[in-house]
Amino acid sequence: MDVTPEAGGDAGHGAASITLEGIRKRYPDGTEAVRELSLEVKAGELAVLIGPSGCGKSTVLRMINRLIEPTDGRILLGDDDVTRVDPVGLRRRIGYVIQNVGLFPHQTVSANVATVPGLLGWPRDRTRRRVDELLELVGLDPAQFGRRYPHELSGGQRQRVGVARALAADPVVLLMDEPFSAVDPIVRTRLQEEFLRLQAEVRKTIVLVTHDLDEAVRLGDRIAVLSQGGHLEQYDTPAAILGTPASPFVREFVGADRGIRRLAVTPVTREVLDPLPADGGAELPAVPLGGSAYDALGALLTSAAEHAVVTEDGQPVGLLSRERVLGLGATVG
Ligand SMILES: Nc1ncnc2c1ncn2[C@@H]1O[C@H](COP(=O)(O)OP(=O)(O)OP(=O)(O)O)[C@@H](O)[C@H]1O
């Protein structure tokens, strides 16, 4: 069988749907990592797998490209059963991006991106064109970055090279295991935005594993919330997952983050302030009246202070305690 780019590709360009049918993974030591999971990712869609540590997310992902062999069940790319094909050939048709990227340290950026085309025996000219095109696509100038080695790049740049490498041979499917977690939050947000633009262009079928609910909500067309043993609690759009959690587990899972998210949109008002001390709180961190409770909490945690002084037009108007800020999160959660 040949997993062609057209296989099952009714929506994405060169993308295939992924169907998991009753897959199960029992490790040799008896661990039931995934008991029974069925899931369909439509061609050209991005599905996020999220859930607590150890619930089986990475195991599911690695069964799709057969880095891990399923104990039971079927996995289809388009109409083709991946459990029946040569795993090495299969992996050349599936892009795989992991945390910390896994670039080859002694090869240049261009050589890294050219890995799979090289294995597939593409002519050198075609490979070179493809490498340049992909580096441009992920926002790296080929002339400037192509000859560098991975250690000469920032973490965010390495991550982009990882994505370019995974896309090099125009895979039918892209698997991403915590692809943005190794970079700081600001770079992460930027990479996520760039990645969404890239996905709008290439429309691959993508399965992405993350711990970060904000990332799941931002990137996912659909989110699969898993509990221990790869149990599928809910598989739905981000809005539906946040708005109508299907089980107490999902409610609790999104609930914790929902409180934090609400803090970001809750302003610090006069109602929550305590009177100023005699010295006006000169030594305390200052936060503006009307600023977000989330930012106020950040200022308190950074300075390890119990109180912040709240200012209006530069003048102190009251004290805000850490307890009050946390209360704002709890009462609106
Ligand atoms: N090779 C292995 N042998 C035995 N058990 C394993 C093996 N690999 C993973 N497991 C177990 O299978 C379960 C699922 O692991 P998996 O890595 O898929 O979870 P995960 O949801 O990706 O976790 P995390 O979020 O912590 O990365 C865990 O209980 C883990 O300890």
Image (spheres, rainbow, N blue to C red):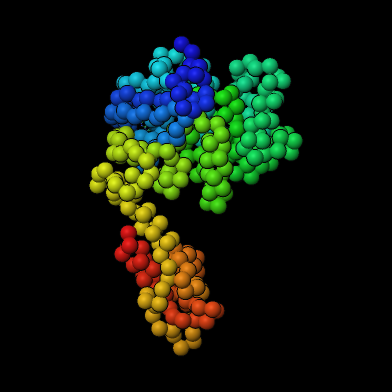
The residue lying furthest to the bottom in this view is 278
Residue 16 in sight here: no
Closer-to-camera residue (267/308):
267
Determine whether, in the image, residue 192 is placed left or right of residue 249.
Answer: right
Measured along the vertical axis of the image, is residue 278 above or below residue 31? Answer: below
Splitting the image into four quadrants, where does ligand 1 fall?
top left
Residue 140 visible in the shown view? yes
| Quarter occupied by residue 195 | top right
Report the residue at 49% width, 87% height from top. Answer: 279
Farthest residue, direction top: 1
Residue at the front extreme? Answer: 10
Residue 168 in the image: above or below residue 177: above
The image shows residue 262 at horizontal and vertical percentages of 38, 59
Farthest residue, direction left: 248
- The residue drawn where x is 69% and y is 25% is 129
Q: Which of 176 and 107 is in front in this view?
A: 176
Where does residue 79 sit, x and y in percent of width and height?
Answer: 40, 17
Q: In this view, does 154 lie to the left or right of 234?
A: right
Q: Nearer the viewer, residue 280 or 263?
A: 263
Res. 330 image quadrant: bottom left
- Residue 307 x/y as whole percent: 43, 75
Q: Quadrant of the rendered structure where residue 35 is?
A: top left
- Identify which residue is drawn at 40% across, 65% down: 266
Figure check: 13 above or below 331: above
Q: Give the residue drawn at x 37%, y 46%.
A: 239
In the image, residue 212 sits, relative to residue 104, either above or below, namely below
* Viewer-side residue, 29 vs 276: 276
Count numbered badges in the picture.
0
Q: Where is residue 245 in the image (x, y as percent from the top left)?
A: 29, 46
State which quarter of the image contains the C terminus.
bottom left
